[in-house]
Image (cartoon, rainbow, N blue to C red):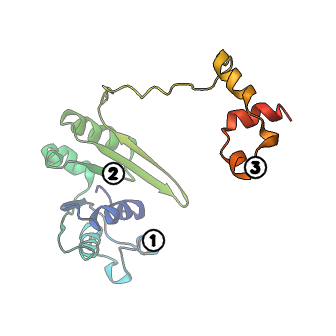
Amino acid sequence: LVNVSAVGTEILKNMILPGVGSFTIVDGNKVSGEDVGNNFFLTKDNIGESRAKAATELLSELNDDVSGDFVEESAEKLIRANPDFFSRFTLVIATNLCERELLELDSLLSKRNIPLLVCRSYGFIGYMRIVIKEHTVIESHPDSAHEDLRLDRPFPRLVEYCNSIDLESMDQKEHSHTPWIKWKESIGNE
């Protein structure tokens, strides 16, 4: 996760609970009162501490089988100083990055075929974009053909059969076992 935000920690939570294996949080900022007010994974006791460290500690408590790590550095500095840092991940989630930083990060990740999930939220509104190289899927098995079994021009023998059945003279049991097509023909378009 690049940058601790409410949406970023919620995404991580949903990956940690089922057992993602491991995660790393990259953030060079300190926890502020505003962060505590809109992020369940930061507390008042964390104000002034590293956001990456505080979020990692609280998220790690969700599942003992998942290991969490953190880097106290801004994404911009990390991209420039150690671009190979991101090559060890199978997915990078970026929240609240400016366009320039996103383009640089995308350039690094696309060369290595690593998906980038870009998220940002503004109150109750947000967006999520998945940045990955094109992946072509070819369906080798065509859809099953569904034959149309309706008869718009019944064959003569079917017409003869339908005409031979007298619904009026049948008892309840016989009538209930009459094919629908014969019943429909007998009442017409009423």
The residue shown at (74%, 37%) is 183
Residue 158 seen anywhere in this rendered image of the structure: yes
Q: Which amino acid type is marked by label 3?
A: Asp
Horizontal side of 56 relative to 179 (left or right) equals left
Q: Quadrant of residue 156?
A: top right
Q: On residue 34, which mark appears?
A: 1
The residue sitting at 69% across, 33% down in the picture is 181
9 shown above or below 98: below
Amino acid type for the residue under numbered disc 1: Glu
- Residue 97 rendering spot, x and y as whole percentages: 37, 49
Q: Which residue is mark 2?
A: 94
Residue 37 image position (x, y, % from top left): 46, 74
| Nearer the observer, 136 or 181 | 181
- Residue labelled with disc 3: 171
Tell me what residue is drawn at x 51 percent, y 25 percent. Answer: 147
Question: Which of the two labelled residues, at mark 3 and mark 2, occupies the earlier sequence position?
Answer: 2
- Amino acid type of disc 2? Ala
152 horizontally vs 42: left or right: right
Q: Earlier in the sequence, mark 1 or mark 2?
A: 1
Quarter residue 161 falls in: top right
Picture coordinates of residue 24 (x, y %)? 21, 60
Earlier residue among tags 3 and 1: 1
User: Could you tell me if residue 100 is visible in this image?
Assistant: no
| Circle 1: element type | helix
Quarter of the image containing the C terminus? top right
Q: Is residue 141 above or below residue 20?
A: above
Front position in the image: 149 or 55? 149
Mark 2 and mark 1 in contact (Cβ < 8 Å)?
Answer: no
The quadrant of the picture occupied by the N terminus is: bottom left
- The crowding category of the residue bearing disc 2, from other C-alpha atoms within 10 Å (few below 14, some 14 to 19, many at least 20), is many
Q: CA distance from mark 1 to mark 2?
A: 20 Å
Instruction: Identify the element where label 3 is drawn.
Output: loop
